Image (tube, grey):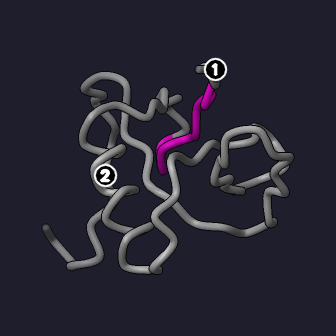
Amino acid sequence: DGRLVVDFGTLSAIDGSPVALVMEEKATEKNKSLELAAGAGMAGAILLGPIGLAGAWFVKGKDVVIPMGTEFYVEVMRDARVSGLSLIPGA
């Protein structure tokens, strides 16, 4: 059995703060649900750094094409304090 480790990098919050991303248990479960809903029954999904969101489903022993724009779940690595934005005057 193979194993793939992916660095999901960071995204910038609305205030510019970096927020590190990972695919831990919660995101993995959400991705499994997403795969089942699509009827795919696939094994996993990955993020490909700066080229944007792309996902891959791995089938043992075969090459995989990762379609651009495929959506899947990731989560923040740790709690992050960021400044918010209020759209309600005076709030």
**Residue 84, label in figure:** 2
Residue 2 in the image: x percent, y percent? 63, 20
- Residue 76 position by quadrant: top left
Residue on which disc 1 sits: 2
Name the residue at 66% across, 67% down.
Answer: 70
| Tag 1: amino acid | Gly
Give me the residue at 33% from left, 37% from top. Answer: 82
Name the residue nearer the viewer: 39 or 22. 39
Viewer-closest of 58 and 20: 58
Judge whether 82 appears above or below 52 on screen: above
Residue 1: name its quadrant: top right
Q: Work out whether residue 87 or residue 49 is closer to the camera in this orientation and state it.
A: 49
Element under disc 2: loop
Q: Is 28 displayed left or right of 4 in the figure?
A: left
Where residue 66 sits in the image (x, y, percent)? Answer: 79, 57
Magenta-colored span: 7-15
Q: Are marks 2 and 1 in contact (CB under 8 Å)?
A: no
61 vs 22, left or right, is: right
Name the residue located 40 percent from the left edge and 56 percent from the top edge: 31
x then y, percent, for residue 29: 28, 49
Instruction: State the image quarter where residue 54 is shown.
Output: bottom right
